[in-house]
């Protein structure tokens, strides 16, 4: 079991390199955006980004999730290549359909979203980009299923570098603002598909598996409904803000959300890329439930370091990255959204039992209910707290969400999660954040010292509460012995990911 966790960690590190480059590019572009886009324009970009997610979620039909479930099913091992071909063809058809269906009504959508028809061309580029992303999801899913993190990382870094270079060119030198951003994205997507064309060709068998596709769609349809609801759970805040407040509030919230989502892109995204195939691959193994339990504990433990770091240093990071002081208040939502992301990540792990037992209808019932709760909280809280109200609505919704998923998943497929340890970690992290944030009104030196001490003390406080098992203490000591001797740092990854 420990070797499986180490294998997942090794892949996470490789995926993390790619995701780190993604976020570094995001950081590089933030000063560009805040210099060449007004807060109002940044609010428009925020609405376009979430609208793109809506299109992708609806028209991808959740098929990639069914692909995960079917790929490792013992009954279909000898049909993996034809199943991949079937999913790819279906996604291409979906891309063509969504592009044709949404391309011409964009003027109407522009008026509806922005009370201005002049953004129709930007919306058309957004629709085309979303359609290409629907296609890209399937080969990227296959790369993850085959556990080829290096191929995934290299190909996506090339895509991102292409998009980065062209974004700077279009925005800074061609003065194309949001239009330039989407042109760069589309070219980057086409470059990625070209890079993966040989890999795709080697992994397809030209045969349509119609009966399997029907079964996959029956499995994924409830997930598509739940994915749509989950998406609205995460994006309804910006739509509601645009109506109850103004686009400047959306801009501040979007920037704070983008900063908090560093955790999602670098940590949650990396772990998900590496771990999702492993969770399904382990579903028939005798010690799988112990594996799921320890994954939950270790995941929460590592994630809380980044949640604390982003929550405590968000103010300083915003001031460094945003040239325009009108953006600086965005730091206020970062801690709230960071803890919200933490609970959402726990929920994703807890869902495994429902997915293994194919209880997708249960998921499809839970998520719309939570989404309606989130919308109601947004409507109420944004009236009084504006963009801070949206952040609090997200946090409350995600806490309730993870509790409900735990209850239903445990009834369906019991896993002995370490609830005491999970609660202990969250409580200590929240207390440390509250204490360290009291230093925000002091000088920069005092602030940095207090916040660093809060993060460093986290694992030691857990030790006082007898959090660690003997084998975990032994591994920590090994890692520390290497860390304190820089010449041996090259052995650090071997110790963490090597044989136990």
Image (tube, grey):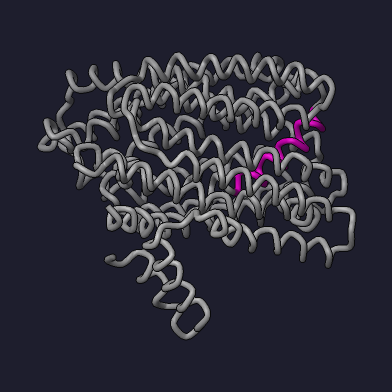
Magenta-colored stretch includes residue 261:
yes
Picture residue at 77% right of the left edge, 21% below the top: 381
Give residue 224's position: percent from left, percent from top: 42, 20
Picture residue at 38% right of the left edge, 66% below the top: 496
Give residue 445's position: percent from left, percent from top: 83, 67
Give residue 72's position: percent from left, percent from top: 20, 37
Main SS class of the magenta portion in the image: helix
What segment is highlighted magenta in the picture? Answer: 247-262
Look at the picture and state if 19 lies above or below 63.
Answer: below
Q: Nearer the viewer, residue 484 or 389?
A: 484
Look at the picture and state if 414 lies above or below 173.
Answer: above
Look at the picture and state if 170 lies above or below 99.
Answer: below
Look at the picture and state if 297 lies above or below 46.
Answer: below
Give residue 27's position: percent from left, percent from top: 66, 54
Image quarter of residue 389 = top right
Magenta-colored stretch includes residue 312:
no
Image quarter of the C terminus: bottom left
Q: Nearer the viewer, residue 195 or 310?
A: 310
Which residue lies most toward the bottom here? 487
In this orientation, does residue 131 appear?
yes
* Left or right of 191, for residue 90: left
Q: Nearer the viewer, residue 353 or 213?
A: 353
Image quarter of residue 105 = top right
Picture residue at 77% right of the left edge, 66% below the top: 449
């Amino acid at each position: 079991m420990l070797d499986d966790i180490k294998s997942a960690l090794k892949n996470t590190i490789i995926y993390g390199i790619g995701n780190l480059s993604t976020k570094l590019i995001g950081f590089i572009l933030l000063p560009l955006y805040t210099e060449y886009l007004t807060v109002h324009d940044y609010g428009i970009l925020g609405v376009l980004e979430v609208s793109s997610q809506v299109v992708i979620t609806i028209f991808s039909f959740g098929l990639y999730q069914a692909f995960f479930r079917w790929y490792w099913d013992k009954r279909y091992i000898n049909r993996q290549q034809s199943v991949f071909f079937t999913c790819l063809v279906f996604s291409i058809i979906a891309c063509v359909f969504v592009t044709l269906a949404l391309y011409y009504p964009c003027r109407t959508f522009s008026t509806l979203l922005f009370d201005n028809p002049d953004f129709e061309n930007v919306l058309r580029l957004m629709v085309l980009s979303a359609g290409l992303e629907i296609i890209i999801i399937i080969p990227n899913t296959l790369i993850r299923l085959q556990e080829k993190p290096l191929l995934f990382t290299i190909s996506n870094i090339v895509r991102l570098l292409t998009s980065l270079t062209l974004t700077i060119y279009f925005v800074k030198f061609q003065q194309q603002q949001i239009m330039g951003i989407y042109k760069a994205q589309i070219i980057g997507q086409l470059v990625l598909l070209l890079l993966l064309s040989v890999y795709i060709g080697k992994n397809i068998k030209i045969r349509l598996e119609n009966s399997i596709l029907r079964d996959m769609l029956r499995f994924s349809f409830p997930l598509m409904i739940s994915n749509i609801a989950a998406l609205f759970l995460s994006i309804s805040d910006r739509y509601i803000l645009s109506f109850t407040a103004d686009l400047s509030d959306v801009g501040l919230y979007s920037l704070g959300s983008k900063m908090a989502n560093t955790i999602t892109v670098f940590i949650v995204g990396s772990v998900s890329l590496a771990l999702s195939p492993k969770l399904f691959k382990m579903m028939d193994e005798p010690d799988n439930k112990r594996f799921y339990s320890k994954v939950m504990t270790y995941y929460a433990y590592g994630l809380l370091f980044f949640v604390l770091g982003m929550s405590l240093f968000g103010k300083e990071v915003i001031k460094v990255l945003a040239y325009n002081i009108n953006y600086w208040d965005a730091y206020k939502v970062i801690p709230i959204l960071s803890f919200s992301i933490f609970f959402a990540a726990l929920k994703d792990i807890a869902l495994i039992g429902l997915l293994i037992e194919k209880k997708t209808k249960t998921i499809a019932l839970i998520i719309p209910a939570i989404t309606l709760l989130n919308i109601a909280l947004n409507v109420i809280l944004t009236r009084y707290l504006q963009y801070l109200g949206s952040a609090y609505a997200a946090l409350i919704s995600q806490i309730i969400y993870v509790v409900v998923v735990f209850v239903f998943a445990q009834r369906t497929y019991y896993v002995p999660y370490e609830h005491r340890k999970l609660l202990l970690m969250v409580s200590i992290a929240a207390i440390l954040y509250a204490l360290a944030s009291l230093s925000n009104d002091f000088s920069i030196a005092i602030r940095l010292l207090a916040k660093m001490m809060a993060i460093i003390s986290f694992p030691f406080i857990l030790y006082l509460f007898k959090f660690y098992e003997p084998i975990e203490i032994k591994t920590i000591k090994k890692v520390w012995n290497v860390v304190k001797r820089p010449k041996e740092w090259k052995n650090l990854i071997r110790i963490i990911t090597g044989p136990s």
